[in-house]
Image (spheres, helix red, strand yellow):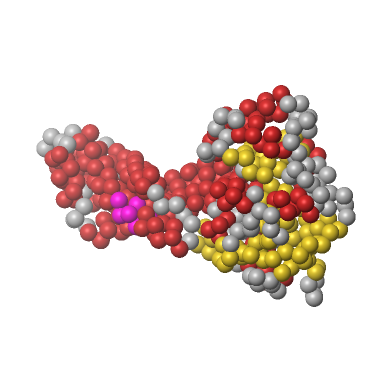
Amino acid sequence: MSFLAKIAFKNLFRHKLRTIVSIMAIVFAVMIVVFARGYIVGLIDSTFADHIQYNSGHIKIVAQEYQQQERILPLIYPVDGFNGQELNGMIESLKEIDEVERVVPRLKYGAMVSTEDELVTMIGWGVDPTQEIEFTDIEDKLLKGRMVQKGQLEVVMGTALLKKLNRQLGDKVTILSNTAFNSLKGVTFKIVGSIETGIKMLDEIVFYLPLDQAQDILYMEDQVTELLLVTENRNLVEQVLPDVKDLLTRNGAADRYLALGYKETSDLLPYMEMAKLIYNQIYIFLVLLACIVVVNTMIMIVKERTKEIGMMSALGLESKDILWLFIIEGGIMGVIGSFFGALFGSLLNAYLSVRGIDFSSALTGFSSDIIIKSIIYPVSSTGNTIYAFVLGVIIVTIACIIPARRAAKLEPTEAMR
């Protein structure tokens, strides 16, 4: 086998330009696979993470009626504890479930601010500042100022929302809200922070305020609109969700509250998981396209070396050895091309994982309900690089069997003639 490998390696340099073109085709295809896979994984992981952090948690508990009318953010269907138990008691019971690391309360409601030109509609998020910072990366998104603090009439707003309201850090803003008793109430807040997340909803519509202040303003003492349960990772949801539902049943709240896994709260996420499977097929197709060049090159080589193949057969080289000779030759091109393709693709992803790819202009028409970042950071990983390298080598080598079998089937006398 080593003898055949030496011959195959030497044969590659007989027509250098043709060999280089074949290798470059493989390099380009494998590089695209590395980039595409890193981009898709980055997009999907980012979308899942943002949805979990800013919408659903790993498991979301809401009132059944609230879930049906969530778009209008009704305040008459709160989560306020189990029967005869306060909200904090319910939270503590949920924390005792295995694998539940944190329970994050949120109170979401509609609000508006009147400017000189228009009435700007917004969504208020009453949050526990400590829990919110620990669960999300919101503090890292602060461009200026700080997060809100308990007991203070303060808000944090997105930069785009501040621009709409013609306000800046340190200014005061009077926000009108519809309370739980369906009455309007205006409260003046101080703007203590501005954020920029790259998510349209958070930058243009949402403002943060302390949970205790939101409850006081809306007349919803010890009530929230949702509880988000956080586990170590999203793969534990199927294990934890039955325990949460069992707890609700044991406390007589199964008919009142819904416990929803993060996939159940989005129509987009199941399709994104399906897309990952589809793209795995596309990666194979990309490498197969490059293999057309390699197979064409190998067929040309077989044609040119017909007499040489006949001579080798006449001197005692068996058909299987000729088969292996051409497979090894194609395999060497596959290894070289896949190595440099995986290397260049990995370097490209490493660069883009820091700089990101900005799709701000493409997402301007998207609904704010869709939680997706305007800047996508491809994932640069060793596993992705190895996957593309192995995929390239295997597919190219298999593709070379076609011309190799053709060479092996040549009859010595016919080939020499």
Q: Residue at x 65, y 49 (%)?
A: 128
Camera sees residue 368: no
* Residue 58 horizontal side relative to residue 114, left or right: left
Of the pair 83 and 304, the residue shown nearer to us: 83
Q: Quadrant of residue 94?
A: top right
In this figure, what is the number of numbered marks? 0
**What percent of the width, then of the height, locates residue 158?**
64, 64
Residue lying at 68% horizontally and 61% vertically, measured from the top left: 155
Where, quadrant-wise, is the C terminus in this rendering? top left
Along the viewing direction, whichever of 213 and 335 lies nearer the viewer: 213
Q: Is residue 344 part of the magenta span, yes or no?
A: yes
Figure quadrant of the N terminus: top left
Secondary structure character of the magenta stretch overall? helix
**Relative height, residue 20 to residue 407 (above, below):** below
- Please say if 70 is above or below 192: above
- In the orientation shown, which residue stands out farthest toward the left? 315
The residues colored magenta run: 339-345
Along the horizontal axis of the image, is 369 left or right of 53? right
- Judged from this view, the residue extending furthest toward the bottom is 116
Residue situated furthest front in the rendering: 151
Q: Is residue 228 magenta?
A: no
> Does residue 356 show up?
yes
> Which residue sits at x=67%, y=66%?
191
Decide which of 152, 25 is in the foreground and name it. Answer: 152
Q: Is residue 140 above or below residue 70?
A: below
Q: Residue at x 64, y 56 (%)?
A: 149
Q: Position of residue 19 (x, y in %)?
A: 26, 56
* Image coords of residue 67 (percent x, y): 76, 41
The spot of residue 363 in percent (x, y) is: 62, 62
